[in-house]
Amino acid sequence: MSVKPRAIHFGAGNIGRGFIAPLLRKSGYHIVFTDVDKGLIDTINEERAYDVHILDGDGSMDGEKEVLEVDHVKGVLSTTNDLIREIEHPKLKLITTAVGLPVLDKIAPTLAKGIKARRAAGGGIINIIACENAIGATAQLEEKVRAHLEGGDAAWAEQHVGFANCSVDRIVPPFSPEEHDADSKLDVGVEEFFEWIVEGPSLKGAKPGALDVPIDGLALTDNLAAYNERKLFTLNTGHAITAYLGYLRGFHTVDQSIADAEIADIVRGALQAESGAALCRKHKFKDTEHEAYIEKIITRFQNAAVKDDVVRVGRQPLRKLGRGDRLVGPARMCVEYDIPVRHLATGIAAALSYENEEDDQSAEMRKAITEKGLDKYVVELTGFEEGSDVHKGILKSYKELEGWKKA
Ligand SMILES: NC(=O)C1=CN([C@@H]2O[C@H](COP(=O)(O)OP(=O)(O)OC[C@H]3O[C@@H](n4cnc5c(N)ncnc54)[C@H](O)[C@@H]3O)[C@@H](O)[C@H]2O)C=CC1
Ligand SMILES: O=P(O)(O)OC[C@H]1O[C@](O)(CO)[C@@H](O)[C@@H]1O
């Protein structure tokens, strides 16, 4: 008897359609997208399929290397009871999310309601994986879901719902169907590279530590912390620095920015001698392998076919300046290992210099710098003491970058 497993994916956006769904579909899952965007859900239900354009080409086919179809998809609005019925569905095996970290708060009550309904319907085990750019995103979601469960429901969830953290890596910027002569506005453009690493021991199922229906392209690990930090403090660190410095220089895309020799030197300096050195010390990555990992990432930034906007990559600078996030996080790790952080300090200063009225966090940051003064604000944001080497380095770079703005 065929299994026909089902998966619900929260957030039918770029990562959902361009990364998670294609892998699930290839592995035999039927995908139910759920989103707050009614227009998007209606389109999914009208079209039932879309194409994923692999943007790693040589310039022929508009920079496209391959086009892959994702079919058998449907959509339900996340604000309706249809979603609860989907969570009850006996063939449901997996729930994934890619909605943005702050949105996990909003979906947690719905997930808890769905879990209660699944228990009442006599449903079986499911696993939940939050595919967001943050360390421990699923653990954060789990805590929020559990806050809405009590008594028998909480005990049932303990036995029947696995919450597994993961690291997700694929560059999926907004895609223009018109530019690519694409058939559907659901189509999405992605780089060829992807990496999805999931914490195996947290998964529940017939075989502990594994999914009952394995996903081709998903790797399991019992050491997620290392891969999570490797990805966030390399890909995201380099990407953010490239974006903020590029923005200051007036570039529009990541590939334009990384083609600037000075920017590329700063990014390499931050990733190799600083975050890379700390990551290798902490997680015992081999130097040569880590160097190759960095170089592969720089090649990915150079991919002109994805046309990744620096404004997208730099979005929400205050989140990116969080103490555990991609800029301050690796700098703090370097300090722990006595590694000087000249280039990371420049990256932090570039984020602090980000001036884009259309980004609420940029506006909030500019206001705070004016009201509190940069010295104090850097202490508040980063936790680095006033007068420490890193603190001084950030202030010095911030001044130097003022010259970039005028250039
Ligand atoms: N785009 C990328 O290259 C990558 C993104 N990520 C992470 O994936 C997450 C999603 O990013 P994108 O796909 O780029 O964003 P996106 O904006 O393209 O998609 C997010 C989707 O979530 C939906 N949504 C918002 N609130 C919702 C709610 N309450 N319930 C259900 N759906 C809701 C939105 O309507 C939208 O369709 C973020 O955490 C991002 O950091 C991670 C790796 C790569
Ligand atoms: O999605 P965020 O966290 O705002 O950051 C953008 C980053 O996420 C990615 O979309 C994928 O990791 C990168 O392109 C970029 O570094």
Image: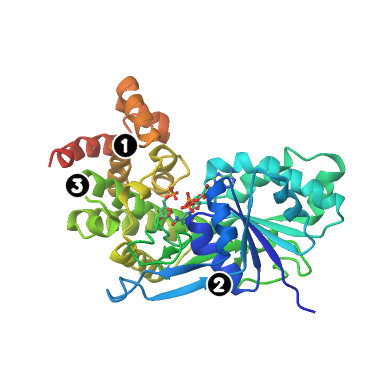
Return the residue nearer the eye: 233 or 31. Answer: 31
**Residue occupying the point 50% across, 54% down:** 13
Which SS class for mark 2?
Answer: loop
Q: Residue at x 62, y 71 (%)?
A: 215
Instruction: Identify the residue position indicated by label 3 in the image.
Output: 249
Q: Residue at x 48, y 74 (%)?
A: 68
**Image spot of residue 277 (x, y percent):** 38, 58
Find the residue positioned furthest to the left: 407
Decide: is 120 above or below 395: below
- The one nearer the camera, 314 or 342, is 314
How many C-alpha atoms fall within 10 Å of the one at disc 2: few (<14), some, or many (≥20)?
A: some
Does the image show residue 259? yes
Front of the two marks 3 and 1: 3
User: What is the quadrant of residue 267 in the picture?
Assistant: bottom left
Amino acid type of the residue tagged 2 in the rendering = Gly
Split into 4 quadrants, where in the image is the C terminus?
A: top left
- Density class for disc 3 (Cα within 10 Å; few <14, some 14-19, many ≥20) is some
Quarter that holds the N terminus: bottom right
Q: Nearer the viewer, residue 223 or 41?
A: 41
